Amino acid sequence: MNLLSVEGISKAFGDRVLFKTLSFGISKGQKVALIAKNGTGKTSILKILAKIDTPDQGEVNFRKGIRVSFLQQEPNLNSNISIEATILSSDNETLKIISTYEKALENPEDIKAYQKAFEAMDLNDAWDFETKYKQVLSKLKLNDLKLKVGTLSGGQKKRLALSKALLEKPDFLILDEPTNHLDMEMIEWLETYFIKEKITLLMVTHDRYFLERVCNEIIELDEGKLYDYKGSYSYYLEKRSLRMAQEDTEAHKTKRHFTKELEWMRRQPKARTTKSKSRIDDFKVIKEKAMQRRNEHRVQLEINMERLGSKMIEMHNVSKAYGHTTILKNFEYNFQRNDRIGIIGKNGTGKSSFLNLLTDSIEPDSGKIIRGETLKFGYYTQSGIIIKKGQKVIEVIQDFGEFIPLKKGRKISAQQLLERFLFDRKKQYDFVEKLSGGERKRLYLCTILIQNPNFLILDEPTNDLDIITLNILESFLLDFPGCLIVVSHDRYFMDKIVDHLFVFKGNGIIEDFPGNYSDFRAYEEENQLIDSSSNIKHKKTWKDKDESKLGLTFEEQKLFKKLGQEIESLEKDKKNFQTRFVEEELIADEIKKLSIILRQLEVNLELKTDQWLELSLKK
Protein backbone atom coordinates (compact mmCIF):
# COMPACT_ATOMS: atom_id res chain seq x y z
CA MET A 1 0.00 0.00 0.00
CA ASN A 2 1.52 3.31 -1.12
CA LEU A 3 1.40 5.95 1.67
CA LEU A 4 3.41 8.74 0.01
CA SER A 5 3.77 9.84 -3.60
CA VAL A 6 6.18 12.66 -4.56
CA GLU A 7 5.92 13.91 -8.15
CA GLY A 8 8.48 16.23 -9.75
CA ILE A 9 9.22 18.57 -6.80
CA SER A 10 11.77 21.39 -7.20
CA LYS A 11 13.12 24.00 -4.78
CA ALA A 12 15.39 27.02 -5.15
CA PHE A 13 16.33 30.01 -3.01
CA GLY A 14 17.06 32.88 -5.38
CA ASP A 15 19.67 31.68 -7.86
CA ARG A 16 20.61 28.73 -5.64
CA VAL A 17 18.87 25.57 -6.92
CA LEU A 18 18.64 22.86 -4.24
CA PHE A 19 16.96 20.17 -6.35
CA LYS A 20 14.85 19.80 -9.49
CA THR A 21 11.99 17.47 -10.52
CA LEU A 22 12.48 14.80 -7.84
CA SER A 23 9.99 11.91 -7.75
CA PHE A 24 9.71 8.93 -5.39
CA GLY A 25 7.17 6.93 -3.37
CA ILE A 26 7.11 5.16 0.00
CA SER A 27 4.90 2.18 0.86
CA LYS A 28 3.46 1.04 4.18
CA GLY A 29 6.02 -0.57 6.50
CA GLN A 30 9.09 0.79 4.71
CA LYS A 31 11.83 2.32 6.85
CA VAL A 32 13.66 4.68 4.49
CA ALA A 33 16.75 6.87 4.91
CA LEU A 34 17.47 9.90 2.72
CA ILE A 35 21.22 10.42 2.15
CA ALA A 36 22.78 13.50 0.55
CA LYS A 37 25.52 16.08 1.10
CA ASN A 38 24.88 19.02 3.43
CA GLY A 39 23.38 21.95 1.58
CA THR A 40 21.66 19.89 -1.14
CA GLY A 41 18.19 20.17 0.40
CA LYS A 42 17.59 17.15 2.67
CA THR A 43 15.85 19.20 5.39
CA SER A 44 13.93 21.18 2.73
CA ILE A 45 12.58 17.91 1.30
CA LEU A 46 11.43 16.78 4.76
CA LYS A 47 9.75 20.15 5.44
CA ILE A 48 7.93 19.98 2.10
CA LEU A 49 6.65 16.48 2.96
CA ALA A 50 5.53 17.73 6.39
CA LYS A 51 3.62 20.65 4.76
CA ILE A 52 5.80 23.22 6.59
CA ASP A 53 7.21 24.39 3.26
CA THR A 54 5.97 24.22 -0.32
CA PRO A 55 7.85 23.15 -3.47
CA ASP A 56 8.35 25.64 -6.32
CA GLN A 57 6.76 23.03 -8.54
CA GLY A 58 5.52 19.43 -8.25
CA GLU A 59 3.15 17.66 -5.86
CA VAL A 60 3.27 15.71 -2.58
CA ASN A 61 0.37 13.37 -1.82
CA PHE A 62 -0.17 11.24 1.28
CA ARG A 63 -2.75 8.47 1.35
CA LYS A 64 -6.04 9.87 2.65
CA GLY A 65 -6.68 9.52 6.39
CA ILE A 66 -3.15 8.64 7.57
CA ARG A 67 -1.51 10.37 10.56
CA VAL A 68 1.85 12.04 9.84
CA SER A 69 4.32 13.28 12.49
CA PHE A 70 7.51 15.28 11.90
CA LEU A 71 10.54 15.59 14.19
CA GLN A 72 12.43 18.74 13.22
CA GLN A 73 16.09 19.48 13.99
CA GLU A 74 14.96 22.59 15.87
CA PRO A 75 11.58 21.71 17.44
CA ASN A 76 8.90 24.38 17.80
CA LEU A 77 7.51 23.87 21.33
CA ASN A 78 5.50 26.07 23.70
CA SER A 79 8.02 27.47 26.21
CA ASN A 80 5.39 28.37 28.82
CA ILE A 81 4.08 24.88 29.60
CA SER A 82 5.62 21.85 31.32
CA ILE A 83 7.06 18.67 29.82
CA GLU A 84 3.94 16.72 30.81
CA ALA A 85 1.59 19.42 29.51
CA THR A 86 3.43 19.33 26.16
CA ILE A 87 2.62 15.63 25.81
CA LEU A 88 -0.98 16.06 27.00
CA SER A 89 -1.68 19.06 24.76
CA SER A 90 -0.40 17.41 21.57
CA ASP A 91 -2.57 16.44 18.62
CA ASN A 92 -2.57 12.83 19.80
CA GLU A 93 -5.20 10.32 18.70
CA THR A 94 -5.02 8.45 22.03
CA LEU A 95 -5.69 11.67 23.96
CA LYS A 96 -8.77 12.29 21.81
CA ILE A 97 -10.02 8.78 22.63
CA ILE A 98 -9.44 9.36 26.37
CA SER A 99 -11.26 12.71 26.16
CA THR A 100 -14.23 11.06 24.41
CA TYR A 101 -14.33 8.36 27.09
CA GLU A 102 -14.27 10.94 29.91
CA LYS A 103 -17.16 12.83 28.27
CA ALA A 104 -19.10 9.55 27.98
CA LEU A 105 -18.62 9.02 31.73
CA GLU A 106 -20.18 12.43 32.39
CA ASN A 107 -23.27 11.42 30.41
CA PRO A 108 -24.08 7.86 31.63
CA GLU A 109 -27.58 7.92 30.05
CA ASP A 110 -26.03 7.59 26.56
CA ILE A 111 -25.11 3.91 26.81
CA LYS A 112 -24.24 3.56 23.10
CA ALA A 113 -21.76 6.48 23.26
CA TYR A 114 -20.20 5.02 26.40
CA GLN A 115 -19.91 1.53 24.86
CA LYS A 116 -18.27 2.97 21.73
CA ALA A 117 -15.85 5.07 23.82
CA PHE A 118 -15.01 2.08 26.04
CA GLU A 119 -14.29 -0.15 23.03
CA ALA A 120 -12.07 2.57 21.53
CA MET A 121 -10.10 2.72 24.80
CA ASP A 122 -9.53 -1.05 24.61
CA LEU A 123 -8.74 -1.08 20.91
CA ASN A 124 -6.09 1.66 21.24
CA ASP A 125 -4.59 0.53 24.57
CA ALA A 126 -5.54 3.93 25.97
CA TRP A 127 -5.99 2.75 29.57
CA ASP A 128 -2.24 2.74 30.14
CA PHE A 129 -1.35 5.91 28.20
CA GLU A 130 -0.01 7.70 31.28
CA THR A 131 2.30 4.78 32.06
CA LYS A 132 3.46 4.68 28.44
CA TYR A 133 4.32 8.37 28.12
CA LYS A 134 6.14 8.31 31.45
CA GLN A 135 8.16 5.29 30.30
CA VAL A 136 9.13 6.97 27.00
CA LEU A 137 10.10 10.23 28.76
CA SER A 138 12.11 8.24 31.32
CA LYS A 139 14.01 6.39 28.56
CA LEU A 140 14.93 9.77 27.07
CA LYS A 141 16.05 11.11 30.49
CA LEU A 142 13.16 13.54 30.96
CA ASN A 143 12.18 12.58 34.50
CA ASP A 144 11.02 15.88 35.99
CA LEU A 145 7.69 16.24 34.19
CA LYS A 146 6.87 19.57 35.87
CA LEU A 147 9.84 21.40 34.30
CA LYS A 148 8.85 24.25 31.99
CA VAL A 149 9.92 23.79 28.34
CA GLY A 150 11.53 27.26 28.40
CA THR A 151 14.08 26.07 31.01
CA LEU A 152 15.20 23.03 28.96
CA SER A 153 18.45 22.78 26.99
CA GLY A 154 18.39 22.37 23.21
CA GLY A 155 19.07 18.66 23.59
CA GLN A 156 16.25 18.19 26.11
CA LYS A 157 13.82 20.00 23.79
CA LYS A 158 14.82 17.69 20.92
CA ARG A 159 14.23 14.63 23.15
CA LEU A 160 10.85 16.00 24.26
CA ALA A 161 9.84 16.56 20.63
CA LEU A 162 10.95 12.99 19.85
CA SER A 163 8.83 11.63 22.76
CA LYS A 164 5.85 13.63 21.51
CA ALA A 165 6.27 12.25 17.96
CA LEU A 166 6.57 8.63 19.15
CA LEU A 167 3.53 8.88 21.45
CA GLU A 168 1.37 10.25 18.64
CA LYS A 169 1.67 6.75 17.08
CA PRO A 170 1.63 8.11 13.52
CA ASP A 171 1.18 5.95 10.42
CA PHE A 172 4.07 7.85 8.81
CA LEU A 173 6.93 9.35 10.82
CA ILE A 174 9.40 11.86 9.34
CA LEU A 175 12.64 12.31 11.32
CA ASP A 176 15.40 14.89 10.86
CA GLU A 177 18.54 13.69 12.70
CA PRO A 178 16.69 11.74 15.44
CA THR A 179 19.88 10.56 17.21
CA ASN A 180 21.31 14.07 17.78
CA HIS A 181 21.44 14.85 21.53
CA LEU A 182 20.87 11.18 22.47
CA ASP A 183 23.48 9.22 24.40
CA MET A 184 24.37 5.68 23.30
CA GLU A 185 21.94 4.05 25.71
CA MET A 186 19.06 6.17 24.32
CA ILE A 187 20.09 5.49 20.70
CA GLU A 188 20.12 1.74 21.28
CA TRP A 189 16.69 1.95 22.94
CA LEU A 190 15.32 3.96 19.98
CA GLU A 191 16.79 1.41 17.54
CA THR A 192 14.99 -1.42 19.34
CA TYR A 193 11.75 0.61 19.43
CA PHE A 194 11.78 1.24 15.66
CA ILE A 195 12.74 -2.36 14.81
CA LYS A 196 9.77 -3.68 16.83
CA GLU A 197 7.17 -1.07 15.84
CA LYS A 198 5.17 -1.53 12.63
CA ILE A 199 5.59 2.03 11.50
CA THR A 200 6.55 3.71 8.21
CA LEU A 201 9.63 5.93 8.53
CA LEU A 202 11.50 8.47 6.42
CA MET A 203 14.59 9.82 8.13
CA VAL A 204 17.71 11.85 7.64
CA THR A 205 20.48 10.67 9.97
CA HIS A 206 24.29 10.54 10.02
CA ASP A 207 24.30 7.54 12.41
CA ARG A 208 25.39 4.69 10.17
CA TYR A 209 24.83 1.87 12.69
CA PHE A 210 21.32 3.25 13.25
CA LEU A 211 20.79 3.22 9.47
CA GLU A 212 22.08 -0.33 9.19
CA ARG A 213 19.84 -1.72 11.92
CA VAL A 214 16.64 0.25 11.34
CA CYS A 215 16.32 1.06 7.63
CA ASN A 216 15.40 -1.35 4.84
CA GLU A 217 15.74 1.16 2.00
CA ILE A 218 18.12 4.01 1.14
CA ILE A 219 17.30 6.93 -1.17
CA GLU A 220 20.40 8.88 -2.20
CA LEU A 221 20.31 12.37 -3.71
CA ASP A 222 23.58 12.68 -5.63
CA GLU A 223 24.46 15.39 -8.16
CA GLY A 224 20.76 16.28 -8.49
CA LYS A 225 19.57 12.71 -9.18
CA LEU A 226 17.77 10.22 -6.93
CA TYR A 227 19.05 6.64 -6.60
CA ASP A 228 16.99 4.00 -4.81
CA TYR A 229 18.59 1.03 -2.97
CA LYS A 230 16.24 -1.65 -1.61
CA GLY A 231 18.34 -2.83 1.30
CA SER A 232 20.35 -1.90 4.40
CA TYR A 233 23.17 0.67 4.65
CA SER A 234 25.84 -1.98 3.95
CA TYR A 235 23.90 -3.05 0.83
CA TYR A 236 23.75 0.62 -0.23
CA LEU A 237 27.54 1.01 0.18
CA GLU A 238 28.17 -2.07 -1.95
CA LYS A 239 25.79 -1.06 -4.75
CA ARG A 240 26.86 2.60 -4.68
CA SER A 241 30.47 1.52 -5.10
CA LEU A 242 29.49 -0.52 -8.18
CA ARG A 243 27.49 2.43 -9.56
CA MET A 244 30.44 4.80 -9.07
CA ALA A 245 32.82 2.37 -10.81
CA GLN A 246 30.39 2.11 -13.71
CA GLU A 247 30.05 5.91 -13.88
CA ASP A 248 33.86 6.26 -13.91
CA THR A 249 34.08 3.81 -16.82
CA GLU A 250 31.37 5.65 -18.72
CA ALA A 251 33.01 9.02 -17.96
CA HIS A 252 36.32 7.74 -19.35
CA LYS A 253 34.59 6.57 -22.56
CA THR A 254 32.74 9.89 -22.83
CA LYS A 255 36.02 11.87 -22.52
CA ARG A 256 37.63 9.79 -25.24
CA HIS A 257 34.58 10.34 -27.47
CA PHE A 258 34.67 14.07 -26.62
CA THR A 259 38.36 14.32 -27.65
CA LYS A 260 37.57 12.64 -30.97
CA GLU A 261 34.55 14.90 -31.64
CA LEU A 262 36.53 17.98 -30.58
CA GLU A 263 39.12 17.25 -33.30
CA TRP A 264 36.29 16.98 -35.83
CA MET A 265 34.78 20.31 -34.65
CA ARG A 266 38.15 22.07 -34.91
CA ARG A 267 38.40 21.09 -38.56
CA GLN A 268 35.19 23.18 -38.96
CA PRO A 269 33.46 21.25 -41.76
CA LYS A 270 32.43 23.58 -44.56
CA ALA A 271 29.45 21.60 -45.74
CA ARG A 272 26.70 22.14 -43.17
CA THR A 273 24.67 19.10 -44.09
CA THR A 274 21.78 17.82 -41.96
CA LYS A 275 24.09 15.04 -40.77
CA SER A 276 26.87 17.46 -39.71
CA LYS A 277 24.38 19.77 -37.94
CA SER A 278 23.06 16.79 -36.00
CA ARG A 279 26.63 15.86 -35.07
CA ILE A 280 27.28 19.42 -33.84
CA ASP A 281 24.18 19.23 -31.62
CA ASP A 282 25.33 15.84 -30.28
CA PHE A 283 28.74 17.36 -29.54
CA LYS A 284 27.14 19.85 -27.12
CA VAL A 285 25.60 16.97 -25.16
CA ILE A 286 28.89 15.00 -25.15
CA LYS A 287 30.80 18.10 -23.99
CA GLU A 288 28.38 18.63 -21.09
CA LYS A 289 28.80 15.01 -19.95
CA ALA A 290 32.58 15.12 -20.33
CA MET A 291 32.83 18.32 -18.28
CA GLN A 292 30.89 16.85 -15.37
CA ARG A 293 33.20 16.24 -12.41
CA ARG A 294 32.27 14.30 -9.33
CA ASN A 295 32.99 16.59 -6.38
CA GLU A 296 34.65 14.00 -4.15
CA HIS A 297 38.17 14.05 -2.78
CA ARG A 298 40.19 11.45 -0.99
CA VAL A 299 42.11 12.99 1.91
CA GLN A 300 45.53 11.36 2.13
CA LEU A 301 47.86 13.73 3.93
CA GLU A 302 51.31 13.33 5.37
CA ILE A 303 51.00 16.20 7.85
CA ASN A 304 54.28 17.67 9.04
CA MET A 305 54.45 17.82 12.83
CA GLU A 306 58.21 17.95 13.31
CA ARG A 307 57.76 20.55 16.04
CA LEU A 308 55.86 18.01 18.16
CA GLY A 309 57.97 17.15 21.20
CA SER A 310 58.07 13.86 23.10
CA LYS A 311 55.93 15.21 25.95
CA MET A 312 52.20 15.78 25.38
CA ILE A 313 50.16 15.85 28.61
CA GLU A 314 50.84 14.04 31.88
CA MET A 315 48.12 13.76 34.54
CA HIS A 316 49.28 12.75 38.03
CA ASN A 317 46.72 11.92 40.77
CA VAL A 318 44.27 14.48 39.39
CA SER A 319 41.03 15.00 41.32
CA LYS A 320 38.10 17.33 40.70
CA ALA A 321 34.72 17.76 42.38
CA TYR A 322 31.81 20.19 42.36
CA GLY A 323 30.29 20.15 45.83
CA HIS A 324 29.39 16.55 46.60
CA THR A 325 29.71 15.47 42.95
CA THR A 326 33.10 13.86 42.23
CA ILE A 327 34.22 14.26 38.61
CA LEU A 328 37.75 12.83 38.81
CA LYS A 329 39.45 10.86 41.56
CA ASN A 330 43.25 10.35 41.59
CA PHE A 331 43.35 10.01 37.80
CA GLU A 332 46.67 9.03 36.19
CA TYR A 333 47.48 9.04 32.48
CA ASN A 334 50.38 9.97 30.21
CA PHE A 335 49.12 11.00 26.77
CA GLN A 336 51.32 9.81 23.91
CA ARG A 337 51.77 10.85 20.31
CA ASN A 338 49.35 8.81 18.12
CA ASP A 339 46.99 8.13 21.04
CA ARG A 340 43.44 7.71 19.65
CA ILE A 341 41.07 7.83 22.60
CA GLY A 342 37.28 7.71 22.61
CA ILE A 343 35.31 9.05 25.58
CA ILE A 344 31.97 7.49 26.50
CA GLY A 345 29.68 7.73 29.54
CA LYS A 346 26.31 9.00 30.62
CA ASN A 347 25.56 12.72 30.82
CA GLY A 348 26.73 14.23 34.11
CA THR A 349 29.66 11.85 34.63
CA GLY A 350 32.26 14.58 33.97
CA LYS A 351 33.25 14.24 30.30
CA SER A 352 33.13 18.01 29.57
CA SER A 353 34.94 18.84 32.83
CA PHE A 354 37.68 16.38 31.89
CA LEU A 355 38.21 18.16 28.55
CA ASN A 356 38.24 21.53 30.32
CA LEU A 357 40.95 20.23 32.68
CA LEU A 358 43.03 19.06 29.73
CA THR A 359 42.79 22.42 27.94
CA ASP A 360 43.52 24.42 31.14
CA SER A 361 40.05 26.01 31.18
CA ILE A 362 39.59 24.85 34.79
CA GLU A 363 42.05 23.90 37.54
CA PRO A 364 42.13 20.52 39.34
CA ASP A 365 41.40 20.39 43.08
CA SER A 366 44.50 18.29 43.60
CA GLY A 367 47.22 16.57 41.57
CA LYS A 368 49.31 17.85 38.66
CA ILE A 369 48.74 18.32 34.94
CA ILE A 370 52.01 18.81 33.03
CA ARG A 371 51.77 20.00 29.40
CA GLY A 372 54.55 19.82 26.79
CA GLU A 373 56.11 23.05 25.51
CA THR A 374 55.21 22.33 21.87
CA LEU A 375 51.60 21.35 22.63
CA LYS A 376 49.01 22.96 20.36
CA PHE A 377 45.32 22.22 20.91
CA GLY A 378 42.62 22.04 18.30
CA TYR A 379 39.29 21.94 20.15
CA TYR A 380 36.07 21.34 18.19
CA THR A 381 33.21 22.13 20.57
CA GLN A 382 29.45 21.70 20.20
CA SER A 383 28.92 25.50 20.22
CA GLY A 384 30.04 25.79 16.57
CA ILE A 385 31.33 28.78 14.63
CA ILE A 386 30.62 32.46 15.34
CA ILE A 387 29.31 34.05 12.15
CA LYS A 388 30.50 37.53 11.18
CA LYS A 389 28.09 39.36 8.93
CA GLY A 390 29.31 39.83 5.36
CA GLN A 391 32.19 37.34 5.71
CA LYS A 392 32.88 34.86 2.92
CA VAL A 393 33.73 31.18 3.46
CA ILE A 394 37.37 31.51 2.33
CA GLU A 395 37.87 34.57 4.57
CA VAL A 396 36.74 32.61 7.64
CA ILE A 397 39.44 29.98 7.03
CA GLN A 398 42.16 32.51 6.23
CA ASP A 399 41.54 34.22 9.59
CA PHE A 400 42.96 31.05 11.19
CA GLY A 401 45.68 30.10 8.71
CA GLU A 402 46.73 30.08 5.06
CA PHE A 403 47.99 26.49 4.77
CA ILE A 404 48.86 23.20 6.52
CA PRO A 405 52.52 22.13 6.11
CA LEU A 406 53.04 18.63 4.72
CA LYS A 407 56.19 16.51 4.61
CA LYS A 408 58.95 17.07 2.01
CA GLY A 409 58.26 20.82 1.93
CA ARG A 410 54.79 20.47 0.44
CA LYS A 411 51.70 22.20 1.84
CA ILE A 412 47.92 22.25 1.50
CA SER A 413 46.40 25.72 1.11
CA ALA A 414 43.20 26.96 2.76
CA GLN A 415 41.48 26.72 -0.63
CA GLN A 416 42.61 23.13 -1.13
CA LEU A 417 41.48 22.13 2.37
CA LEU A 418 38.03 23.62 1.72
CA GLU A 419 37.85 21.74 -1.58
CA ARG A 420 38.67 18.47 0.16
CA PHE A 421 35.81 19.13 2.55
CA LEU A 422 33.39 19.69 -0.36
CA PHE A 423 33.48 23.51 -0.69
CA ASP A 424 34.19 24.05 -4.39
CA ARG A 425 35.81 27.28 -5.59
CA LYS A 426 32.42 28.91 -6.26
CA LYS A 427 31.12 27.96 -2.81
CA GLN A 428 34.24 29.39 -1.14
CA TYR A 429 33.16 32.88 -2.18
CA ASP A 430 29.60 32.52 -0.85
CA PHE A 431 28.61 34.50 2.24
CA VAL A 432 28.70 32.35 5.38
CA GLU A 433 25.12 33.26 6.34
CA LYS A 434 23.93 31.44 3.17
CA LEU A 435 25.31 28.09 4.40
CA SER A 436 23.12 25.33 5.83
CA GLY A 437 23.59 24.16 9.44
CA GLY A 438 25.62 21.15 8.33
CA GLU A 439 27.81 23.26 6.02
CA ARG A 440 28.59 25.64 8.90
CA LYS A 441 29.70 22.68 11.03
CA ARG A 442 31.90 21.52 8.14
CA LEU A 443 33.42 25.01 7.86
CA TYR A 444 34.03 25.13 11.62
CA LEU A 445 35.87 21.81 11.35
CA CYS A 446 38.12 23.29 8.64
CA THR A 447 38.97 26.29 10.89
CA ILE A 448 40.21 23.82 13.52
CA LEU A 449 42.25 21.71 11.08
CA ILE A 450 43.93 24.68 9.25
CA GLN A 451 45.60 25.63 12.56
CA ASN A 452 47.56 22.35 12.32
CA PRO A 453 47.08 21.24 15.96
CA ASN A 454 49.04 18.33 17.40
CA PHE A 455 46.48 17.54 20.12
CA LEU A 456 43.00 17.36 18.58
CA ILE A 457 39.83 17.20 20.70
CA LEU A 458 36.52 16.59 18.90
CA ASP A 459 33.38 16.98 21.03
CA GLU A 460 30.42 15.46 19.12
CA PRO A 461 31.93 16.23 15.68
CA THR A 462 29.40 14.08 13.79
CA ASN A 463 26.25 16.04 14.77
CA ASP A 464 24.70 17.67 11.67
CA LEU A 465 27.44 16.40 9.33
CA ASP A 466 26.32 14.35 6.35
CA ILE A 467 27.65 10.83 5.77
CA ILE A 468 29.84 11.91 2.83
CA THR A 469 31.59 14.52 5.00
CA LEU A 470 31.98 11.97 7.80
CA ASN A 471 33.80 9.62 5.42
CA ILE A 472 36.15 12.47 4.45
CA LEU A 473 36.75 13.42 8.10
CA GLU A 474 37.50 9.77 8.96
CA SER A 475 40.07 9.60 6.15
CA PHE A 476 41.69 12.81 7.42
CA LEU A 477 41.84 11.56 11.02
CA LEU A 478 43.30 8.21 10.02
CA ASP A 479 46.27 10.18 8.62
CA PHE A 480 46.46 12.53 11.64
CA PRO A 481 49.82 11.93 13.41
CA GLY A 482 49.09 13.78 16.68
CA CYS A 483 47.06 12.85 19.76
CA LEU A 484 43.31 12.53 19.19
CA ILE A 485 40.43 12.54 21.69
CA VAL A 486 36.87 11.99 20.47
CA VAL A 487 33.63 12.41 22.44
CA SER A 488 30.87 10.99 20.28
CA HIS A 489 27.65 9.01 20.32
CA ASP A 490 28.32 7.92 16.73
CA ARG A 491 29.33 4.29 17.24
CA TYR A 492 30.42 3.75 13.61
CA PHE A 493 32.71 6.80 13.76
CA MET A 494 34.19 5.69 17.11
CA ASP A 495 34.83 2.16 15.85
CA LYS A 496 36.74 3.44 12.83
CA ILE A 497 38.82 6.13 14.58
CA VAL A 498 39.70 5.15 18.17
CA ASP A 499 41.70 2.24 19.56
CA HIS A 500 40.89 2.58 23.26
CA LEU A 501 38.21 4.17 25.42
CA PHE A 502 37.95 6.20 28.60
CA VAL A 503 34.69 4.90 30.08
CA PHE A 504 33.23 7.44 32.53
CA LYS A 505 31.38 5.42 35.18
CA GLY A 506 30.45 8.32 37.50
CA ASN A 507 31.67 9.15 41.03
CA GLY A 508 35.12 10.02 39.61
CA ILE A 509 35.76 6.52 38.19
CA ILE A 510 37.26 6.30 34.67
CA GLU A 511 38.11 2.93 33.16
CA ASP A 512 40.68 2.66 30.36
CA PHE A 513 39.25 0.02 28.00
CA PRO A 514 41.60 -1.42 25.30
CA GLY A 515 39.42 -1.46 22.17
CA ASN A 516 36.73 0.42 20.24
CA TYR A 517 33.03 0.81 21.07
CA SER A 518 31.92 -2.49 19.48
CA ASP A 519 34.64 -4.30 21.45
CA PHE A 520 33.34 -2.63 24.63
CA ARG A 521 29.72 -3.62 23.91
CA ALA A 522 30.77 -7.22 23.21
CA TYR A 523 32.72 -7.23 26.50
CA GLU A 524 29.72 -5.84 28.43
CA GLU A 525 27.32 -8.38 26.89
CA GLU A 526 29.72 -11.25 27.67
CA ASN A 527 29.87 -10.11 31.30
CA GLN A 528 26.06 -10.02 31.44
CA LEU A 529 25.93 -13.57 30.06
CA ILE A 530 28.45 -14.71 32.67
CA ASP A 531 26.34 -13.06 35.39
CA SER A 532 23.14 -14.69 34.12
CA SER A 533 24.77 -18.15 33.74
CA SER A 534 26.09 -17.75 37.30
CA ASN A 535 22.52 -17.14 38.49
CA ILE A 536 21.35 -20.28 36.62
CA LYS A 537 24.16 -22.28 38.19
CA HIS A 538 22.94 -21.31 41.67
CA LYS A 539 19.35 -22.08 40.56
CA LYS A 540 18.15 -18.59 41.47
CA THR A 541 16.45 -15.97 39.36
CA TRP A 542 15.56 -12.39 40.29
CA LYS A 543 12.12 -13.68 41.42
CA ASP A 544 13.77 -15.98 43.98
CA LYS A 545 15.80 -13.14 45.50
CA ASP A 546 15.91 -13.34 49.28
CA GLU A 547 14.17 -10.23 50.66
CA SER A 548 16.36 -10.37 53.78
CA LYS A 549 19.29 -9.28 51.57
CA LEU A 550 17.51 -6.24 50.18
CA GLY A 551 18.43 -4.06 53.12
CA LEU A 552 14.78 -4.01 54.28
CA THR A 553 13.78 -4.07 57.93
CA PHE A 554 11.66 -6.99 59.18
CA GLU A 555 8.49 -4.84 59.06
CA GLU A 556 9.35 -3.63 55.54
CA GLN A 557 9.85 -7.23 54.35
CA LYS A 558 6.36 -8.10 55.61
CA LEU A 559 4.88 -5.01 53.90
CA PHE A 560 6.78 -5.84 50.65
CA LYS A 561 5.20 -9.32 50.50
CA LYS A 562 1.76 -8.02 51.47
CA LEU A 563 1.86 -5.32 48.78
CA GLY A 564 2.77 -7.90 46.12
CA GLN A 565 -0.30 -9.97 47.04
CA GLU A 566 -2.58 -6.90 47.16
CA ILE A 567 -1.39 -5.64 43.75
CA GLU A 568 -2.11 -9.05 42.21
CA SER A 569 -5.61 -9.04 43.73
CA LEU A 570 -6.35 -5.46 42.59
CA GLU A 571 -5.24 -6.24 39.02
CA LYS A 572 -7.68 -9.20 38.92
CA ASP A 573 -10.52 -6.98 40.24
CA LYS A 574 -9.74 -4.31 37.66
CA LYS A 575 -9.83 -6.86 34.84
CA ASN A 576 -13.16 -8.29 36.10
CA PHE A 577 -14.82 -4.86 36.24
CA GLN A 578 -13.53 -3.98 32.76
CA THR A 579 -14.98 -7.29 31.46
CA ARG A 580 -18.40 -6.44 32.98
CA PHE A 581 -18.46 -3.17 31.04
CA VAL A 582 -17.96 -5.04 27.75
CA GLU A 583 -19.99 -8.21 28.29
CA GLU A 584 -22.99 -7.14 30.41
CA GLU A 585 -25.98 -5.02 29.41
CA LEU A 586 -25.93 -2.30 32.04
CA ILE A 587 -28.31 0.54 32.82
CA ALA A 588 -27.02 4.07 33.29
CA ASP A 589 -26.92 3.95 37.13
CA GLU A 590 -24.97 0.68 37.08
CA ILE A 591 -22.46 2.11 34.60
CA LYS A 592 -21.96 5.16 36.83
CA LYS A 593 -21.42 3.01 39.94
CA LEU A 594 -19.01 0.67 38.15
CA SER A 595 -17.05 3.64 36.76
CA ILE A 596 -16.58 5.08 40.27
CA ILE A 597 -15.44 1.68 41.61
CA LEU A 598 -13.05 1.19 38.68
CA ARG A 599 -11.51 4.63 39.17
CA GLN A 600 -10.99 3.92 42.88
CA LEU A 601 -9.38 0.57 42.01
CA GLU A 602 -6.96 2.29 39.61
CA VAL A 603 -5.98 4.92 42.22
CA ASN A 604 -5.40 2.17 44.82
CA LEU A 605 -3.40 0.09 42.38
CA GLU A 606 -1.15 3.04 41.46
CA LEU A 607 -0.49 3.91 45.13
CA LYS A 608 0.41 0.33 46.10
CA THR A 609 2.56 -0.15 42.98
CA ASP A 610 4.52 3.01 43.86
CA GLN A 611 5.05 1.70 47.43
CA TRP A 612 6.16 -1.70 46.13
CA LEU A 613 8.62 -0.11 43.66
CA GLU A 614 10.08 2.13 46.38
CA LEU A 615 10.72 -0.87 48.63
CA SER A 616 12.09 -3.02 45.79
CA LEU A 617 14.75 -0.38 45.03
CA LYS A 618 15.84 -0.06 48.67
CA LYS A 619 19.12 -1.86 49.36
Image (cartoon, helix red, strand yellow):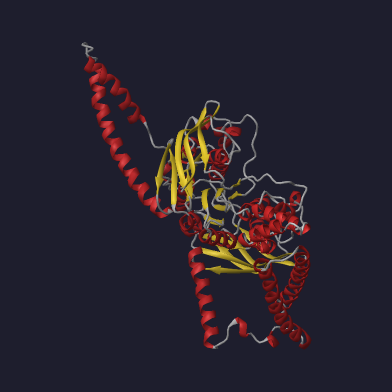
Q: Which quarter of the image is occupied by the C terminus?
A: bottom right
Residue 26: where, in percent of width, then height? 47, 46
Can the viewer see residue 206? no
Left or right for 323, reference 516: right
Residue 577: where, in percent of width, then height? 70, 71
* Above/below status of 515 relative to 103: below
Left or right for 151, reference 272: right
* Above/below status of 102 relative to 561: above
Give the tally of numbered discs.
0
Residue 245: where, in percent of width, then height? 32, 44
- Residue at 42% of width from left, 36% of height from top? 223
* Above/below status of 145 relative to 376: below
Please name whichever residue, 232 or 156, is drawn nearer the observer in this view of the structure: 232
- Residue at 68% of width from left, 73% of height from top? 576
Please name whichever residue, 249 or 193, is drawn nearer the observer in this view of the structure: 193
Please name whichever residue, 326 or 82, is drawn nearer the observer in this view of the structure: 82
- Residue at 25% of width from left, 24% of height from top? 261
Left or right for 287, reference 309: left
Can the viewer see residue 110? yes
Residue 430: where, in percent of width, then height? 55, 30
* Above/below status of 52 relative to 262: below
Please name whichever residue, 38 or 325, is drawn nearer the observer in this view of the structure: 38
Left or right for 543, reference 410: right
